[in-house]
Structure formats: C-alpha cells, structure tokens
Image (cartoon, rainbow, N blue to C red):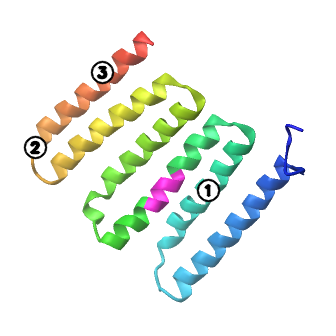
Amino acid sequence: MRGRILTIKKSTWTMLSLIINSSCFVIGSLISFLVLNQYNYWFFLFCLFLGVHLIVKSCMFKFDSCCYFGVLLFFIGAFYFYCLYLNIYKIYPIFLILSFSIASYITSQFYHQPFQFFLSLSLIFVAVGLLLYIINYISLLFFLAFLLASVLILIMKFLTI
C-alpha cells in the first residue's frame, strides 16, 4: 500500500515523530535551564526539533512547504549551536542567510522548482557580500550595491522563467 511504511500508516509515523521530537525538546530545554544555566537555548532547540519533525512530515506526505520550513528551522538551530561551539557569533547572520539558501536549494532539488534554485544562488551571493562587509573588506555602499544587483538579477530571472 502507498499509505503505509512497514505496514504502519504514515500518519502514525508522523505522530511518533512529533512525540519523539517534543520529548527531546523538553528534555533539552530542561537540561539547558537546570544544568547549563543557559536561558536562550530553548528557542534554538525548538527550531532544531521542529525542523526535524517537519522534514519527516515532508518525506511522508511530499509537502514542499514542510520541506522548506523544516530545513530552514533545522539549519537555524544547527548553525546557532555551531557558532556557539566555535565562538563565532559575529558571523551568525551569514549562517542565517545560508539557512535560507540551503532550504531553497533542497526544495528545488526534491520538488523540481527552478525559482528556488535561483533564489538559493542569489542568497549565496548576498551571504558572500555580507561576509565581506562584516570583515570590513568592503564598505556599506558597495555592500548595498552588491545586494541591489543580486535582487535585480533575481527579479530578471523570475520574469524570464
């Protein structure tokens, strides 16, 4: 049957994913509050585990919106802990833009949406421009010109698809 995996309904697998990810979120939040005394980890743990649940849901039911949002939330949470581990908070906005880019790219590859692919390329160029601006390699005017050029190229590509 197409609605079952290992003779178990897909909705049951999705509910199991929700229960497991919710439990992991609660346990992780309690550990961060009580043991680590960190009061802002809960949001990024929420992003991480909700992203995993949405990715499972998109795999089960072939929802492109769940795929995009799940990958986006997963990488927002994962990149926060990556920046925390390496102590590189200064460039965390670049990782946020890369989260959007990765989500667009994965959605374009699994669901054959060409605009998502060009959006991911445009966001990579914006992330490179922002990195150059953050490390003081280019000025604000050059960054804004770079950003405007990327947006204009994306609009032109959107109009020609």
Circle on res. 153: 3
In percent of the image, x 35 and y 23: which residue is there? 154
Q: For numbered disc 1, what is the local secondary structure?
A: helix
- Amino acid type, residue under disc 1 in the picture: Val
Start-end of magenta stretch: 73-78
Q: Is residue 122 above or below residue 152?
A: below
Q: Nearer the viewer, residue 43 or 127?
A: 127
Residue 59 versus residue 30: which sits nearer the camera?
59
Q: Is residue 75 magenta?
A: yes
Q: Identify the residue position indicated by label 2 in the image.
A: 138
Q: Position of residue 21 (x, y in %)?
A: 68, 64
- Mark 3: which amino acid? Ile
Q: Quadrant of the N terminus?
A: top right
Mark 3 and mark 2 lie on one chain; the one further toward the N terminus is 2
* Residue plotted at (40% across, 34% down): 120
Residue 41: percent from the left, percent from the top? Answer: 49, 72
Q: Answer with mark 1 or mark 2, whichever residue precedes in sequence.
A: 1
Numbered disc 3: secondary structure? helix
Residue with the mark numbered 1: 52
Rendering coords of residue 16 (x, y %): 79, 60
Residue at horizontal 73 percent and vertical 60 percent from the top: 18
Q: CA distance from mark 1 to mark 2?
A: 37 Å
Nearest to N terminus: mark 1 or mark 3: 1
Q: Amino acid at mark 2?
A: Ile
Residue that protrudes farthest toward the top in the picture: 160
Secondary structure beneath dot 2 equals: loop
